[in-house]
Amino acid sequence: MATIKIRAKAKDGVTTVKALISHPMESGQRKDSKTGKLIPGHYVTEVTAEHNGNQVMSANWAGGISKNPYLSFKFTGAAPGDSIKISWVDNMGKNDSAEAKIK
Amino acid sequence: MNLIRRKFVKSTAFLSVGATLVGSGLLIPRRALAAYAKDAFAARDVEGAISGSLGSSNYSASDAVKLKAPDIAENGAVVPVTVSSSMGNVDAISIVATSNPGPLTSTYQLSSACEPFISTRIKMAKTGDVIAVVKADGKLYSATKEVKVTIGGCGG
């Protein structure tokens, strides 16, 4: 089950990474319209990005990030063909990671 | 003989206490770095959100921080936000939505290879300011933009 889509492109020495993660990002503040009970929070807490095994970026998230989150960042020092790996962990202990080649 | 043994026990005890101190001293900052900023997300005020994620709530507005967000968001569940900066040595960025129940939406740690640029989509409960706080050389700089959230998504 791949939950992460990655696009990474190197141009003039700067690599732009764009990632889409499939995740409900339930904030824990919404109520179920039928039962009136709070829907338990289920959201990604940590996202990390590695370039050839070295961490370049890490993010802390909570329920304030939209459903099916989008994240883009830029870094230098990568060449086309290098690998970029993005991983996430959520508050229920689920996790996933995906790897892509920089174009 | 006994005296020497006493001394030996004392000195080893002292050494081991020292070793545990050093060991824990080394462990604590590493754990703090990797830890999830739970307190910052639990904070219900903007100061707590910023100090919890970036270590200080003493920030000043700066033209060097650019925050791109829509003037009017028709759907508060998806508000695209882009933060960039012309400053060097940016090592962390936080995005705060002041009117949210928990104002901190996200915080980012950037390595030295990273450009000061983050783009994502946040949720906003209602109309309010979005504050982007950038940490550069240990100081905090911010940019603020008001985003109007129209309920019902009719764009009114």
Image (spheres, coloured by chain):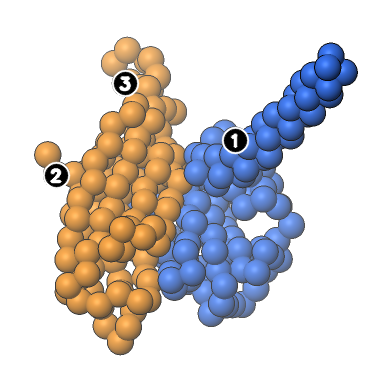
Residue underneath mark 1: B39
Q: Residues within 10 Å of mark 1 (few under 14, many from 20)?
A: few
Q: Residues within 10 Å of mark 2 (few under 14, many from 20)?
A: few
Q: Nearer the viewer, residue A65 or A47?
A: A47
For chain A, what colour was chosen? orange
Question: Where residue A17 sits: x, y (%)?
Answer: 29, 66
Q: Quadrant of residue A9?
A: bottom left
Labels 3 and 1 within one chain: no
Residue drawn where x is 78% and y is 24% of the image: B8
Query: Which element carries disc 3, helix, strand or loop?
Result: loop
* B54 sits to left or right of B106: right
Residue underneath mark 2: A2
Considering only vertical position in the picture, is B109 above or below A90?
A: below
User: What's the amino acid at mark 2?
Assistant: Ala
- Distance, label 3 to label 1, CA atoms, is 29 Å
Residue drawn where x is 49% and y is 56% of the image: B109
- Distance, label 3 to label 2, CA atoms, is 31 Å
